[in-house]
Amino acid sequence: MSAPAEEAVPAGKLRSVVTHLAMTPPPPHAPPARPPGVAIWRRWTISTDEYLLLYAEIGEGWLWWSRLTWDVDLLQDYLVEEETEIYVAEADGEEIGLIELDVRPAPDIELRYFGVVPSRIGTGLGSWLLRYAIAAGSRHRPRRMILNTCTYDHPGALAFYRRHGFAVTHSEVEFVDDPRLTGLLPLDAAPHVPLARPADG
């Protein structure tokens, strides 16, 4: 008899279902009109500190951790490369949204990171920001725009992407170190996700 799924997860690990989606092809169109009081532009230069602050504010609640493992110099080089497109949305002098496009998987283009700060969730900003990302990506005339979401993203993320024209291509199961136990994220991050079983548990 196989062990229950929760017992099959190795100590210190989280089990995540990663769902991959694609839009084929993203339709070319002008960026949507900006909501009142919101500005957005491509950041040709952005420091690692500024990027990681926004990355953490948007992603800590959803266990975004992978960029936190990068060497600072490697991350800085990545952020300013031609193939990386970083867009930051602002309102009232605060950074409120992030788009990160990667053209390296040509002929596809990947939406690597996308999100809004917690105070803007449910305001409609996310829908506008995704439509902006699609328009920005479509300028490259890619075969597809691709992205992925996982178990620990916003519970409505998968339906949200489908509403905006993305279709599921495949899914996979990953086991990753719980970033709260490794010290990458605070122990109280993403309280809706139970901490992984510790090695001595």
Image: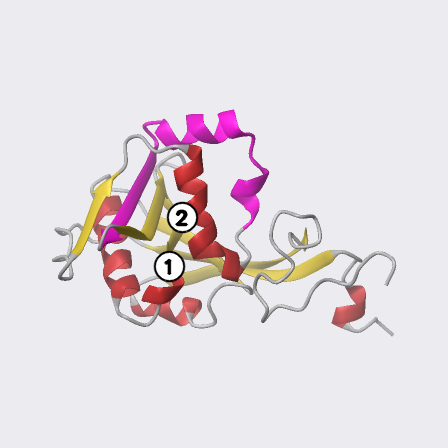
Magenta extent: 65-91
Closest to the observer: 4 or 132? 132
- Is residue 71 shown in magenta? yes
- Label ID, residue 117: 1
Do the numbered discs 1 and 2 sit on residues whose CB atoms are within 8 Å? yes
Q: How many marks?
A: 2
Q: Where is residue 37 shown, x and y percent of the image?
A: 15, 58
Give me the residue at 67% from left, 69% from top. Answer: 194
Eyeballing the image, is 193 above or below 12? below
At 59% from the left and 58% from the top, the residue drawn is 172
Gap between marks 1 and 2 measured at Cα: 8 Å
Question: In screen coordinates, is 68 left or right of 50?
Answer: right
Query: Element type at marker 2?
Result: helix
Residue 87, placed above or below residue 155? above
Residue topped by disc 2: 54
**Nearer to us in this view, 176 or 187:** 187
Amino acid of disc 2: Leu
- Amino acid at dot 1: Val
